[in-house]
Amino acid sequence: MLDIAAELHRWCEEGRDFAVATVVAVGGSAPRQPGAALAVDSAGTAVGSVSGGCVEGAVYELCRQALESGESVRERFGYSDEDAFAVGLTCGGTIDILVTPVRAVERVRPVLGAALATAARAEAVAVARIVQGPDGLPGRLLVVRPDGSYEGTLDGPGVTDAAALDRTAAAQAHALLEAGRTDTVTIGADGSRCGAPLELLVESSVPPPRMIVFGAIDFAGALVRVGKFLGYHVTVCDARPVFATARRFPDADEVVVDWPHRYLDATEVDARTVLCVLTHDAKFDVPLLRRALRLPVAYVGAMGSRRTHLARLDRLREVGVGELELARLRSPIGLDLGARTPEETALSIASEIVADRHGGTGLPLTGAHTPIHHDAERVTPRAAAGRRGRLGSVVA
């Protein structure tokens, strides 16, 4: 749901009634992951996607029905080779969809609206919703902030200790928010991990990950464009003011004139940050990579020929960089696509970053027997029993 936060926040501001269909569990080769959403307002306008097109029509109709009935519904969609006209996923996987109406008069709406506004500003927030449990509970939600505070409540039928339940759910959501993950968790209705189980979907919205491109060369311009397309906050850094200009890199979020290693010392990075070193000049590369390879970032790649790479390794060893640290370095940077132009080279680099992030092999899918959809960052959630059934109103 938070992937379409900007549109949903606008609908809240305009007082529209709408229904949100959210992927809450997946199995096999599913096209979208938990948290992906499609929303439909009372006028029939739709935003978002839950399957890349396979079941959008059926989910659209479920949203329209939920708006009329005021009740939530959960349904599983999968592949059927017995009925050619059945609605399902052509990829062979399964997805569970929870559809919940959000009406202007409901008390949850201001809390949800505030969370949507926060996500639309690309600030950190998590929304924990009950997606499986006793009638009257699915759809209830908590909004959790980075400091651990929370708004809303999961209280409802069958809950014996609402305060304990909210505290436990908020703690689980806060842990996922800190990790920048969307996932499902199971807790007891009394706030423990026993008793009547409740399945929660925790959606985390965090600021976009950073891509820092060192070296204001022509290849950097193409990589900036690809990085923005992939959703990164992109910074270009170079010590040469004649090259590091906003005019040369209009798509970059920031253009910094500084020595690369000095800028890296001063800026904030995290486990999602990718560092792309395109300078291939020892006076820049060596002090920069000496620091970069010791930081807990997602990816460190450096441009250069194989000869340049071997000479660079020798220089790094001379300044005390160890073999385990050197093993983190992706150099020559990128996958072997036969790239020649800056745009093709940028695609090669981006492909390696994506493969590294999700555990992909970088090999052609044709003839391979490896999974099409990798997700190294996610523990596959337990798929709940597929069924279509009335689950009660989103809020009391």
Image: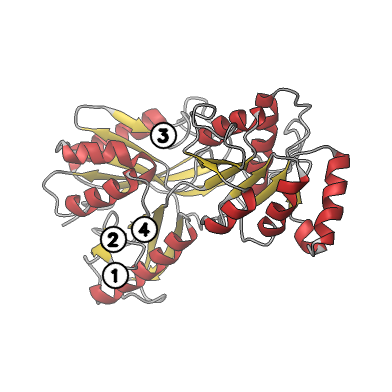
Left or right of 315: which side holds 236?
Answer: left
Q: Do residues under tags 1 and 2 come within 8 Å of each other at their CB atoms?
A: yes
The alpha-carbon separation of the residues under discs 1 and 2 comes to 8 Å
Crowding at label 4, few (<14), some or many (≥20) Cα neighbours within 10 Å? many
User: Counting residues from the N terminus, which is met first, the one under dot 1 or under dot 3?
Assistant: 3
Q: Is residue 133 visible?
A: yes
Question: Residue 153's spot in the image, x, y percent?
Answer: 23, 64
The residue at which mark 4 appears reads as: 132
- Residue 68 horizontal side relative to residue 280, left or right: left
Q: Is residue 57 above or below residue 391?
A: above
Q: CA distance from mark 1 to mark 3?
A: 30 Å
Q: Residue furthest left?
A: 105
Front of the two marks 4 and 2: 2
Q: Which mark is residue 166?
A: 1
Q: CA distance from mark 1 to mark 4?
A: 16 Å
- Nearer to us in this view, 197 or 220: 220
Query: What numbered label is drawn on residue 49?
Result: 3
| Secondary element at image label 3 | loop
Q: Earlier in the sequence, mark 4 or mark 2?
A: 4
Q: Earlier in the sequence, mark 1 or mark 2?
A: 2
State the CA–CA distance, disc 3 to disc 4.
Answer: 22 Å
Q: Residue at x 22, y 47 (%)?
A: 71
Residue 9: where, in percent of width, then height? 25, 41
Three-letter code for the amino acid on which mark 4 is drawn = Gln
User: Around disc 1, counting alpha carbons within 10 Å, would you say few (fewer than 14), some (14 to 19), or many (20 or more)?
Assistant: many
Residue hosting label 2: 142
Please, what secondary structure does the residue beneath circle 2 have? strand
Q: Are marks 1 and 3 in contact (CB under 8 Å)?
A: no
